[in-house]
Image (cartoon, rainbow, N blue to C red):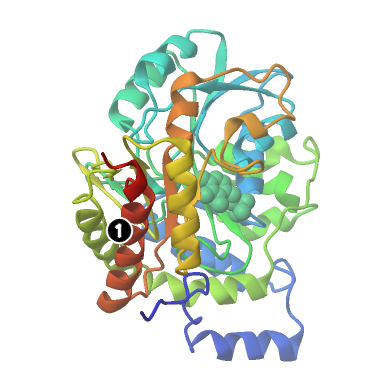
């Protein structure tokens, strides 16, 4: 069987070369050297325009964007920040980095936030919320925004892995006060590293811009109301989390590729999901009504099968060339909350734990072709068969 390479990304568009050559020749790599139109500034303008947001700030990673977002909210030390119990370790890490305390809520077996637990915990003195659209799965954002608006609690969207997802006609990342995205290689747009935040709030973005390292008068190169900058000049620490021009030159030509990548990713995902769902042992959760996904991986739950059979399944798939990660079945998965041992008094989340012990993660790069998708699917289906077959000796 011809299995595709599941890890390499798409080539960077050829058009990036001219700009990268120019930057190499001029050595103009720092975003604030040019008087205007630096690649990072152009990226911010283009990204904000595409998302329909007023402002964007490009930074060194999505983790940096999350950290700056929390800092910009000017929360008191040890403020409680509500986050989902199923997310990447970068999210609780950004909370800890901002001198706040992460409060974890339960997640259901469809990978969405448990709204009963969320609304309960929202009443426990929460100062801010980070919603992580984990692996592109969107929780009920209407319900979440209604609850948070009523409680007057600001929402930061971690849309690191959700660029291109639509929620009831609105772009994910534009629903909360700030939306954060990643350009790390495993995300929809690949610059190796990088991130960006978007918001409509001039004061918030001014604070993030200064703290990201727009020291002295460099903030004048950002199109934000000057009054907002004047208020914060010299009053905020500088964390130097800027993006460099080379990264922006890698990202900008990929913005035009995004609609195709999203379309292909969704097509691939839905094709594989329909085939996997034919197995009695596999369940791919449906999207919520009004959610248009932008996946580059697939998650599914193993049902009616014990840990021994799960291990056999992973082993069989691996031997056949498809890497399956069961979030909870390794000692170091960064998406299993019990591995976030840097959190003091780490809580137990029985429902989320049960989900993580059964939930599988398989990369599904958007560039895969039909025959490659078939090959991956067949490995998964034959591995589950092998893992669940009762050995002949045990058949009466
Ligand atoms: C990748 C990812 C991050 C972190 O992004 P970086 O740019 O690597 O810091 C945060 N949250 C989620 C859900 C992610 O998938």
Number of labelled discs? Answer: 1
Q: Secondary structure at mark 1?
A: helix
Q: Say which quadrant the C terminus sits in.
A: top left
List x then y, in percent, for residue 334.
62, 43
List x then y, in percent, for residue 211.
73, 44
List x then y, in percent, for residue 142.
29, 29
Task: Note whether residue 224 is visible.
Answer: no
Is 255 positioned to the left or the right of 209 in the image? left
In the depicted structure, whether residue 230 falls above or below residue 40: above
Q: Residue at x 47, y 37 (%)?
A: 307
Q: Which residue is mark 1?
A: 381
Give the class, few, some or many, for how many residues have Cα within 10 Å of label 1's Cα (few <14, many ≥20). many
Is 233 positioned to the left or the right of 170 in the image? right
Is 165 positioned to the left or the right of 12 in the image? left
- In this view of the protein, which residue sits in the foreground, 148 or 232? 148
Q: Residue at x 58, y 43 (%)?
A: 205
List x then y, in percent, for residue 52.
36, 52
Q: Quadrant of residue 305?
A: top left
Task: Note whether residue 182 is visible.
Answer: yes
In the depicted structure, whether residue 330 falls above or below residue 270: above
Q: Residue at x 50, y 56 (%)?
A: 315
In the depicted structure, whether residue 68 falls above or below residue 144: below
């Amino acid at each position: 069987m011809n299995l595709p390479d599941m890890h390499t990304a798409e080539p960077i568009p050829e058009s990036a070369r001219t700009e990268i050559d120019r930057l190499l020749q001029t050595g103009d790599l720092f975003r604030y050297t040019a008087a205007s139109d630096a690649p990072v500034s152009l990226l911010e303008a283009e990204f904000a325009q595409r998302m329909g947001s007023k402002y964007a700030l490009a930074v060194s990673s999505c983790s940096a964007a999350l950290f700056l977002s929390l800092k910009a909210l000017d929360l008191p030390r040890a403020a409680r920040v509500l986050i989902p119990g199923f997310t990447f370790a970068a999210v609780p890490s950004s909370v800890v980095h901002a001198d706040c305390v992460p409060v974890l809520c339960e997640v259901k077996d469809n990978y969405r936030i448990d709204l009963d637990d969320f609304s309960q915990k929202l009443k426990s003195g929460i100062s801010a919320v980070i919603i992580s659209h984990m692996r592109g799965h969107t929780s009920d954002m209407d319900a979440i925004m209604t609850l948070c608006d009523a409680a007057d609690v600001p929402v930061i969207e971690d849309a690191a892995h959700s660029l291109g997802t639509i929620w009831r006609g609105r772009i994910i990342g534009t629903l909360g006060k700030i939306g954060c995205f990643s350009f790390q290689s495993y995300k929809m747009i690949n610059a190796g590293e990088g991130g960006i935040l978007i918001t409509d709030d001039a004061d918030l973005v001014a604070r993030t811009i200064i703290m990201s390292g727009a020291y002295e008068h460099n903030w004048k190169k950002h199109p934000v109301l000057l009054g907002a900058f004047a208020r914060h000049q010299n009053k905020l620490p500088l964390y130097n989390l800027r993006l460099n021009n080379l990264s922006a030159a890698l990202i900008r030509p990929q913005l035009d590729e995004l609609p195709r990548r999203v379309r292909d990713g969704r097509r691939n995902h839905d094709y594989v999901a329909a085939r996997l769902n034919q197995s009695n042992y596999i369940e791919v959760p449906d999207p919520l009504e009004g959610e248009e996904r932008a996946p580059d991986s697939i998650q599914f739950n193993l049902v009616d099968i014990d840990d021994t059979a799960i291990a056999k399944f992973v082993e069989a798939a691996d031997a056949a060339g498809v890497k399956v990660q069961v979030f909870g079945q390794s000692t170091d998965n960064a998406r299993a909350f019990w591995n976030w041992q840097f959190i003091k008094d780490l809580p137990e989340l029985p429902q989320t734990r049960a989900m993580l012990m059964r939930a599988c993660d398989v990369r599904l790069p958007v560039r895969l072709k039909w025959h490659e998708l078939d090959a991956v699917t067949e490995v998964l289906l034959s591995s589950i068969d092998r893992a669940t077959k009762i050995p002949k000796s045990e058949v009466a």
